[in-house]
Amino acid sequence: MDMNRLNFVCVALLLGLVIAADTGHAQVVVGQDGKDVVYLPTPQELVEKMLDMAAVTPQDLVIDLGSGDGRIVIAAAKRGAKALGIEYDGPLVDLSRQTALREGVGDRATFVQADLFTTDFSEATVVTMFLLSDMMLKLRPQIAEMKPGTRVVSNSFEMDGWAPDDTVRIPSCNTWCTAHLWIVPAKVEGTWRLPQGELTLKQTFQDLSGTLTTGGQSVPVLFGLMRGEEIRFAAGSSELSPDAASTLLR
């Protein structure tokens, strides 16, 4: 067993051996054969908070990566959204389908048995997950290429190098109390000609830097931020708000 695998198993044992799903189907799967995954149910209060942060509506397609017993998918379907769970463990997929039917959302909550690392989830408007940070890091390139404005919500773990847009912690909570939100940003790096002058932007996920050149003088871009397709920054006496910047993204 290599050290990465050993470290994962140790983490899984520490995190998972005392967790039981509140459906009455207590089950923990540590290190599924060939997969660095572990089934840990998200507390229902955090499920609702994650969906609140993503502002899920009936117009959304919610895809849960590693859907476990299906609770996030089912909760999203109860809000009217179309929801899909991707889960590697066959018995959990069966359990999820049965629960969705019992909860009356079998028409909107569907589940597939698949490897989340080889499954296309690019059509989602909301992505949810409860995965270790190293697994999220593997998914980060695919997430970053999703449609701008896609909301991504994680239980507890973060994507290294990509800071969340928002973080919420449930008060009076002991374990799995934190949800992180990312909003996939539009790509605006490059040089643009604006009424205020020539704008050169560098971009790291939602963070922007660069310069605005007017009349041969350059000033730095300050407070540059992308939130989906909205852009905001200040440069000298110029401030570009989301409304004023809309032409930059056309």
Image (cartoon, rainbow, N blue to C red):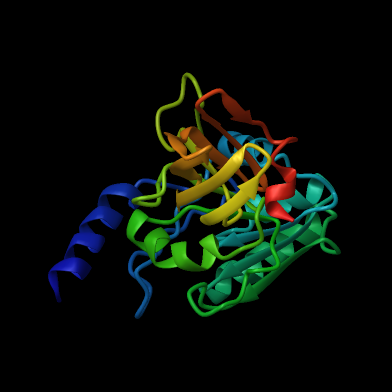
* Residue at 46%, 33% in the rendered image: 177
User: Residue 115 location in percent, x, y?
Assistant: 51, 77
Spot the residue most to the front.
Answer: 215
User: Which is nearer the eye, 179 or 77?
Assistant: 179
Q: Quadrant of residue 48?
A: top right
* Residue at 45%, 62% in the rendered image: 140
Q: Quadrant of residue 230?
A: top right
14 relative position to 203: left or right:
left
User: Which is nearer the eye, 99 or 105?
Assistant: 105
User: Residue 20 location in percent, x, y?
Assistant: 46, 48
Judge whether residue 95 can be spotted in this image. Answer: yes
Q: Quadrant of the C terminus?
A: bottom right
User: Which is nearer the eye, 116 or 248?
Assistant: 248
Q: In the displayed structure, would residue 72 be above or below residue 123? A: above
Judge whether residue 184 can be spotted in this image. Answer: no
Q: Quadrant of the N terminus?
A: bottom left
Q: In the displayed structure, would residue 57 be above or below residue 168? A: below
115 relative position to 34: left or right:
right
User: Residue 163 location in percent, x, y?
Assistant: 42, 42
Q: In the displayed structure, would residue 80 be above or below residue 234? A: below
* Residue at 53%, 62% in the rendered image: 143
Q: Quadrant of residue 56?
A: top right
User: Which is nearer the eye, 14 or 62?
Assistant: 62
* Residue at 55%, 23% in the rendered image: 237
